[in-house]
Amino acid sequence: MKRSRWSAFGGWVAVILAVAPAALAAMPGARAQREPHIGYVYPAGGRQGATFQAAIGGQYLDGVSGVDISGGGIHATVIEHVKPLNGKEINLLRDRLKELQQIMNAPKPEKWEGDTGDKANAAASPDPNMDRAALQKEMAEIKKKLANPKNRNRDNPQLSEDVTLKVVLAPDAEPGQRELRLKTASGLSNPLIFHIGQLPEYTEKEPNSKTADTEVLSLLPLVINGQITPGDVDRFRLKLSKGTRLVAAASAQELIPYLADGVPGWFQATLALYDTSGNELAYADDYRFHPDPVLFYEIPKDGEYVIEIRDSIYRGREDFVYRIAVGELPFVTSIFPLGGRAGAQTTVEANGWNLPASELTLDGGLRPGISNFDFRISNLKCSVPFAVDTLPECLEKEPNNEQASAQPVTLPIIVNGRIDQAGDVDMFRFEGRAGDEVVAEVYARRLDSPVDSVLKLTDASGRQIAFNDDHEDKGAGLTTHHADSLLSITLPADGTYYLAIGDAQHKGGPAYGYRLRISPPQPDFELRVVPSSVNVRAAATTALTVYALRKDGFSGEIALTLKDAPSGFTLASGKVPAGQDQAKVTLKVPAMPTKEPLSLCVEGRAVIQGREIVRPAVPADNMMQAFFYRHLVPAKDLKVMVTPRAKPKPILTPPKEPLPPLSRG
């Protein structure tokens, strides 16, 4: 595979990083309040039944008292919270350490308090209220605080505070992604992804930048956890047998989707596989259009091999956290078709590595939309995106590359097709009348297909009526290249029309599947509510932002309400006005604080073509990528923490001055 496309950025990354603090401070939407924020959790997951410690880096975490994790089967408690010291605090601790050292070095009295024997001599102790063990303990604690490198290095203030957790995973905890938030005195932090897995887990041990420093990992498959520091390279030795179909899949951007102060806006990991002589056997710096790399290689002979992970341009810091699933693992590279009709089971062709079968049957009980369909291979949970719709469906039929052989379709229809080979073009023919509104929309990249689609609509004479390459879907918050196409056109005349779909990069193959909707407009909407963690004082109000993602020309008003809200929670000014894409709404909370975070559900209602349509508002966070771009990244839950009201500050009245003495007249 090609070397990293990001390596060309190296010359100007330093310039951007140099101006980062000022740039971030000046950006619209910069944090107005000191909301608790967490930047990473390490390790970012664990195996069912395991107990371990995890480190979290963040900011504004005063009073951290607990952890909120979605789903059951997991329990986490706070062990320690460490903040960097300011100059005054450092000087006070140094003075105290000096004082304690003087006490320890003073002539020892015959007996210290706390020792057995006559306590009469305790008065001779320089500090008779402390025994020697207590003095040593205090000195050790002060030295630990002073040794914190973050007292001096303040390059990443958003990671300046450290929290240590004890994590206990139940043996039957459901595997998959969870959301982890910290509970602090000022409320909940933002969520981070935390994995519960089924494989053995290994945490890197430094130093491991040289092969000779690494231990041999022979219990495969497993998950490797690590962090990349500046200029760091992590290597791991694997004992592998001839014929092993090795899969190594890294999670990095998946764990922390966007970095506001880094280019390209995430940890750009690379994977490489070497033999013991240092020969590179395989390399990956991405997986198709995903930044996280996946490496495939069939082992030619028994022996030891080295897998290496690093950042593509040798950056690094604490939030460059990764997980690598490595071994002879099942991995689905593509399915076809990419979706099915609601209410019907769909049998799909499955391609990939280490799959026990070439076909999967997907349940028809999924709701319309795009969902991650979960299934098990070799007792491991796997997921593939799968689209479900209510429109009629058909399969593309070759040959259909030219107007003369165009495949006839009757609208509305969803075509499941493939760009079979490089340069392939699929063409479809339909009849239309003047004034008919027609929408043609491709679902490919949003379903993990590598197709970079282009659509072209022509009339019977070959005259181009409409063309589209890329169309941005604001609901696809984890997508940075919106490669799916969309056309919306009013037909100019009665007649036959031809719709062609191809790949903009002239590529193709078995994995290049697509779903093409051709239909009259299907007006609809989706909603996102931001932020996903809400902190508000008891009996107060706070603002939420609701984004309306309008589809196929829908422009009507959307009424917003809370669904099944706990007592005391209300939503005021709850609507997205007609023609608007977002609105601020006011959430009012009860007068009593909540002991634990509560989950709320916002939903929207609109009348479309005479029917009331109800859609849930998906919780999301408005995240910044690389100083500029912003994305609505979906979350699992809208969590609300009601904190105690602030205590009123006492009113200080100056003392009355005494009256002047009476003069003698």
Image (cartoon, rainbow, N blue to C red):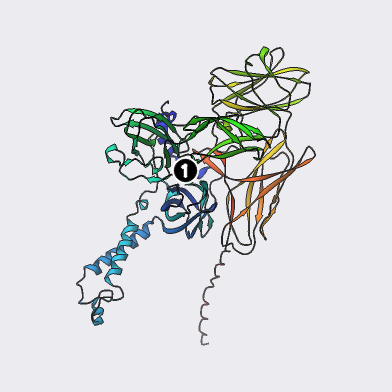
Q: Position of residue 276 (x, y in %)?
A: 29, 32
Q: Position of residue 6 (x, y in %)?
A: 43, 30
Outermost residue on the right side: it is: 610
**Quarter of image, res 427:** top right
Viewer-proximal residue among 193 and 203: 203
Q: Amino acid at mark 1?
A: Ala
Q: Position of residue 306 (x, y in %)?
A: 33, 35
Q: Secondary structure at mark 1?
A: helix
Viewer-proximal residue among 521 and 465: 521
Q: Position of residue 323 (x, y in %)?
A: 43, 42
Total labels: the figure holds 1
**Quarter of image, res 246:** top left
Q: Residue at x 72, y 38 (%)?
A: 579
Image side of residue 169 versus residue 588, left or right: left
Image side of residue 384 versus residue 50, left or right: right
User: In which quadrant is the N terminus drawn?
Assistant: top left
Outermost residue on the front side: it is: 356
Q: Is residue 33 above or below residue 643?
A: above
Image side of residue 141 versus residue 536, left or right: left
Viewer-proximal residue among 540 and 113: 113
Q: Is residue 437 above or below residue 582?
A: above
Label 1 Cα crowd, 10 Å radius (few <14 / some 14-19 / many 20+): few
Image side of residue 391 versus residue 376, left or right: right
Residue 99 visible = no
Residue 254 visible = yes
Q: Which residue is mark 1?
A: 22
Q: Is residue 429 above or below residue 391?
A: above
